[in-house]
Image (spheres, rainbow, N blue to C red):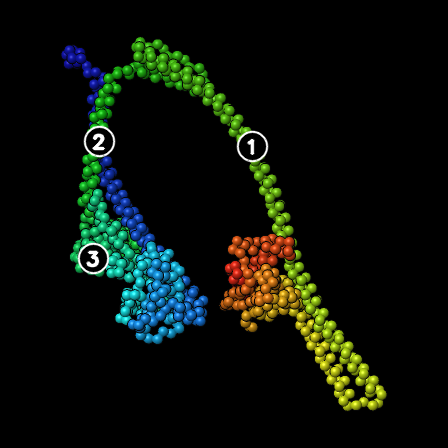
Amino acid sequence: MNATLSGKPPASLARQLSLQISLLVVLMVGALAAIAFWSVQREIAAVVPGTMLSTVQLQAAQQGQSFQLADASVRRLAREWLQRSGKLGEAEAERRFGELFERSADGVWRLRPALVDTERAPTFYLQGSKPLDADVRRRAVLGYELLREQGPALVPPFFSAYTDFVEKGLMVYSRGIDWGKGATPATDNFNYPTMTGADPRNNPKREVFWTPVYFDEEAKAWMVSVIQPLDLQGRWVGTVGHDITIDTLLQQIGQADAELGALTMIISRDGQLIAHPELRERIAKAQGQLALATLGDPVLSAVHALIASGGDTAQAARTPDGRHLVAWSRIAGPDWWAVRVAPQARIDELLHRGVLWMLAVGLVMLLLTLLLLHRVIRQRVKQPLSDITSSVEALAARVHHGEEPQTLPAQGSADLQRLSQAFDAMAQDLASHRRQEQAAQAALQSEVHERRQAEEAVHRLNLSLEARVRERGEALQQAQQELVQRETLASLGSLVAGVSHELNTPIGNALMATDTAVTALADLEGMLAGGVVRRSELSRGMQLARECVGLALANLKRSASLVQDFKQVAVDRASLQRRAFNLRRVSEEVVHLLQVSLKSPGCTVEMDLPIELVLDSFPGAFGQVLTNLVENAVVHAFNGRSDGRILISLVRSDEREVVLTVSDNGCGIAPEHQGEVFKPFFTTRLGQGGSGLGLHLVYSIVCNVLGGEIELDSEPGEGTRFTLTLPRRAPD
């Protein structure tokens, strides 16, 4: 029997829709809850290990930062120590050792009491049971000067910086601590880990190494040391190192993660427990590192097994029984690993708690949604809204095509009538906005067109400016090259003038001696023609003729030598010909001609070059470099002084290159000018004969022709030194 015959009214549309939609929503929420639980479980299983790994990597990076700095610092200090060792002379070392150190009454060598300053300088002790040779005294001076200069900048961040001596001694900078004062004749650092680890028998590769953790009684802190062995001429002489406090690191490790229940610890590769928030006292009793084998803890043993099998990469994995999640990352420096262990049960508990919260929130949202749906469905406006929708669709199409909208038909309900009026007003607004949009679009297109034209004009202007700049640059470069060429020719001209002037004297002397010899021979010829000649007169005439001829020959040889030197230098510079040449010989030729042309009575040019050194290069270019450097020193360095000295010396040479220096004892170069001297047209004697191209020409020849490098080192009042590094074979 249907509902009408039974007298029961049919269920309302709102009620029917509410029941059906509510059932669908409940089913959807249940399905979504199940999917959410499965998805969250999978996501947590994928995300938590990555999160723990990122956390432990960040901790390892933070913990290893100071270790990396310490490692780099000891390597740098060792290089600096070796460099200074090659520069410190024996006499200077002996003098400084006597000024700095003295042997105390107990036989121990210490820093002189007047020089002890624990805030600014290192302290020192060295056992005096054996006589100290020159090498030990020299190394003591080296260590003191190095740590005095750099120790205050390194402590902190490090606790100390020091050098050990194999002769049972220690030079150490540790702010506020006098290590020499506490030393006794029985103090012996040779068996410390810092020395045993550096012994060539234990460290044949001479690598940087880290000591085990130890408790420093002086500092009342846990520490670890990084050590670099020091070898001098193939012989082990000591170490250089840093002590680093790790108390802050241990405090950070002691802070457990209460939310996840995770423990953070540090384990060494060889199975030593360095830090653990629950085993601090046992680690302290074990002298800073507790062997995992003595604990018998299956979790820690499983953690160490995972680390040992994982190589050096940071990883995250579960223990074999699946009860713990482990993440580990290597700490730079000591062979330690930052480890984070979280119980899987705690992770599961957090997962279940999160899912319960999601379900609770979902149920609340479900109830609110059902109430809202029930209220909306009760409106029963399906058919009127359908009619209005059809009209609106037609309206939208007309507005889109630019046609004027039509008004909606009248409605039977006041509410729907107001809705129709609202739609009519909206249609008018849409049409108006459409017309405005079309106008704006046309204006925008016009503006874009104008802007493109302006950009094209700017682009053409930029191309024109770039062409002008390029032309000006080429013209400037050509002018600069011409000025450099003129400077080179002017230098050669100066040599010509000097040589010409120098040739006047020997040639004049030769002419005078020859004339005297001719006169003497003529007198002898007259006496012989007369028939009566005394033996004494004949001998005296012949002796005078012989002396005059010898004097003329010596002056002519001097002129020939000067002409030969000038000829070789002039040919080399004019042709820029490459050939093998003797470095000392070419340098002597250049210096000889310079002494002739410069005529500076207050300046001497000295050379310290080996005879056998040969270069395959450009002698003319090399001679031009020497000429400009010496002339620059004569003009600028001495200011009328009578004790000027210029030295050309060899620093070192090998199969690939030679290193020369041209130095003077003049007034030096001001610091603000040192960065400018190689630039063209820079001179401090503008209008006084300086062109500003001399040192620029030197720089260009050394770098572009000879294929080498040039460096400047100068202190005001201390002179100037130019260092030339030249290849034995110049580039093609």
The amino acid pointed to by label 1 is Ala
For marks 2 and 3, the one nearer the N-term is 3
Gap in angstroms between the C-alphas marked 2 and 3? 48 Å
- Residue type at the position of mark 2: Val
Q: Residue at x 53, y 68 (%)?
A: 650
Q: Residues within 10 Å of mark 3 (few under 14, many from 20)?
A: some
Q: Nearer the viewer, mark 2 or mark 3?
A: 3
Mark 1 or mark 3: name the one nearer the start of the chain: 3
Q: Which mark is residue 361?
A: 2
Up-down: is 239 above or below 21? below
The N terminus - image quarter? top left
Q: Nearer the viewer, residue 695 or 301?
A: 695
> For numbered disc 2, what is the local secondary structure?
helix
Residue named by callout 3: 283
Q: Are marks 2 and 3 in contact (CB under 8 Å)?
A: no
Q: Earlier in the sequence, mark 2 or mark 1?
A: 2
The label number, if any, that marks residue 83 in the structure image: none
Tell me: residue 411, above or below residue 696. Answer: above
Residue found at x 36% / y 61%:
121
Q: Which residue is mark 1?
A: 454
**Residue 181 picture location, percent across and down:** 30, 65
